[in-house]
Amino acid sequence: MKHVRRSFILVLVALGLSACGVRGGLETPTENVATNSTEGAQEKAPKEHKPFILDGLIR
């Protein structure tokens, strides 16, 4: 009986966590849009990648 209860709780937690977030399309960052329009043709160089421990899992 304990296993059934634990499984049920784990399923509820997983469903709750998977429901987090906003449903819909991506939103543009309004702050960056405003600054990019005032800069005109100036382009910024991409930032250098700093290694991280979990990079192997992400890439």
Image: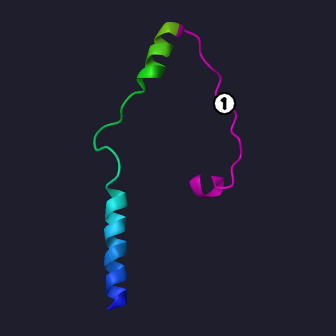
Would residue 57 be found to the left or right of residue 21 on screen? right
Q: Position of residue 32 (x, y in %)?
A: 48, 21
The magenta stretch spans residue 5: no
Q: Position of residue 25 (x, y in %)?
A: 31, 37
Relative to 13, say whether 48 is above or below: above
Question: Which structural element holds mark 1?
Answer: loop
In the rendered image, which quarter is residue 16 located in?
Answer: bottom left
Relative to 31, say whether 16 is above or below: below
**The N terminus, quarter of image:** bottom left
* Rendering colour mode: rainbow
Q: Residue at x 32, y 83 (%)?
A: 5
Would residue 30 be found to the left or right of residue 19 on screen? right
Residue at the extreme left of the image, as rendered? 24
The three-letter code of the residue at mark 1 reads Lys
Would residue 44 be found to the left or right of residue 38 on screen? right
Residue range corresponding to the magenta coloring: 39-59
Would residue 34 be found to the left or right of residue 19 on screen? right
What residue sits right under mark 1 in the picture? Answer: 47
53 and 59: which is toward the camera = 53
> Would residue 40 be visible to someone looking at this image?
no
Q: Residue at x 36, y 66 (%)?
A: 14
Q: Residue at x 57, y 53 (%)?
A: 58
Q: Position of residue 52 (x, y in %)?
A: 69, 49
Q: Residue at x 55, y 9 (%)?
A: 41
Secondary structure mostly seen in the magenta stretch: loop
Q: Position of residue 55 (x, y in %)?
A: 64, 52
